Image: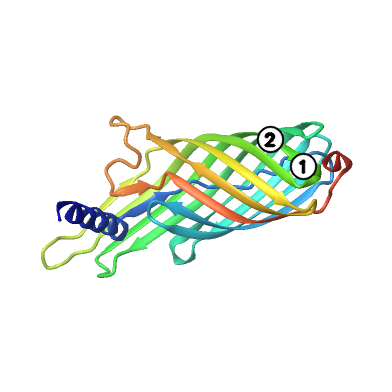
Amino acid sequence: MKRLNLTFLTIASFVTMTMCSCIAYRPQVVEMPLIHEKGELQINGSIGLSAPFGDGYLGTTVSYGATDWLAVQGHANWNGDKGGYGQVSVGAFKAWDKAVLEGFIGCGFGGNKWKNTDKDRIFTSNYQLPFAQVEFGWAGLANGHIDIGVGLKGGFIFPNIVDHKLATENRPESIVTSKVPVGLLEPQFFMRAGGKHLKWTFNFGFSQLWGTGADGVPFSGTSAIYMPFTINTGITYDFNVFEKKGK
């Protein structure tokens, strides 16, 4: 009976946190292209889920090899009435047969909003995210049918958070804001498998944030929290399957 009660309390606590949580940020899992050559174009579509509070979204990524070493990329995702995120980046790539090293710099822009069921509290989080990212992996393994790799993103979140509690019979109106930058470190793992052009893709990302204020707490002073994990899955189409991938 004690074990049953403990299980019930754990579930109840999780549900309560889910209902009351104000999500300011979740890992932004962007497809890592592993571009090999000039003219290579990849388009990805995916669905994702962030944990532990179940924030789902739809996303798309477009990557292109503009020169023999320069690549550009754009990404956007949308999670309904809660908000969305978009980023653009430019970087360099170097290929050694099937192995690829990429480095990107870019900037992202995102936002989330939340309103409780009684409509006595409104929470919004808008932010800019300048970043640098390095990626390494192998493209075209198993006769062109498998790509696999890892990446690491680092940057700073510049938030504009408004935590607005409306006046009720038992509480006066209050507005708490935060614009203190937040450091970010975001590792990611991915795998693609399928045909030489069309592949199923799986990505897993993790975020570690730290505040730059005196207490070191991200989004300090507000009720904002962040979700540490994101997974997504989808399909990626490569319009330029070159000889190196086919080897």
Q: Residue at x 13, y 61 (%)?
A: 171
Instruction: Specify the amino acid type for callout 1.
Output: Ala
Q: How is the image coloured?
A: rainbow
Q: Which mark is residue 142?
A: 1
Quarter of the image for residue 4 reads bottom left
Q: Earlier in the sequence, mark 2 or mark 1?
A: 2
Q: How far across and how far down the image is residue 135, in percent?
A: 64, 34
Q: Residue furthest right?
A: 243
Label 2 crowd bin: few (<14), some (14–19), many (20+), radius 10 Å: many
Q: Residue at x 44, y 58 (%)?
A: 55
Q: Residue furthest front?
A: 1
Is 184 left, or right, of 135 in this rendering? left
Mark 2, mark 1: which one is toward the viewer? 1
Q: Residue furthest left?
A: 170
> Which part of the image, by quadrant, shows the N terminus?
bottom left
Quarter of the image for residue 246 reads top right
Q: How far across and how far down the image is residue 201, in percent?
A: 64, 51
Task: Name the residue beneath numbered marker 2.
Answer: 137
Q: How far across and how far down the image is residue 199, in percent?
A: 72, 53
Quarter of the image for residue 104 reads top right
Is 110 left, or right, of 15 in this rendering? right
For label 1, the SS is helix
Q: Residue furthest bottom?
A: 118
Q: How far across and how far down the image is residue 121, in percent?
A: 27, 62
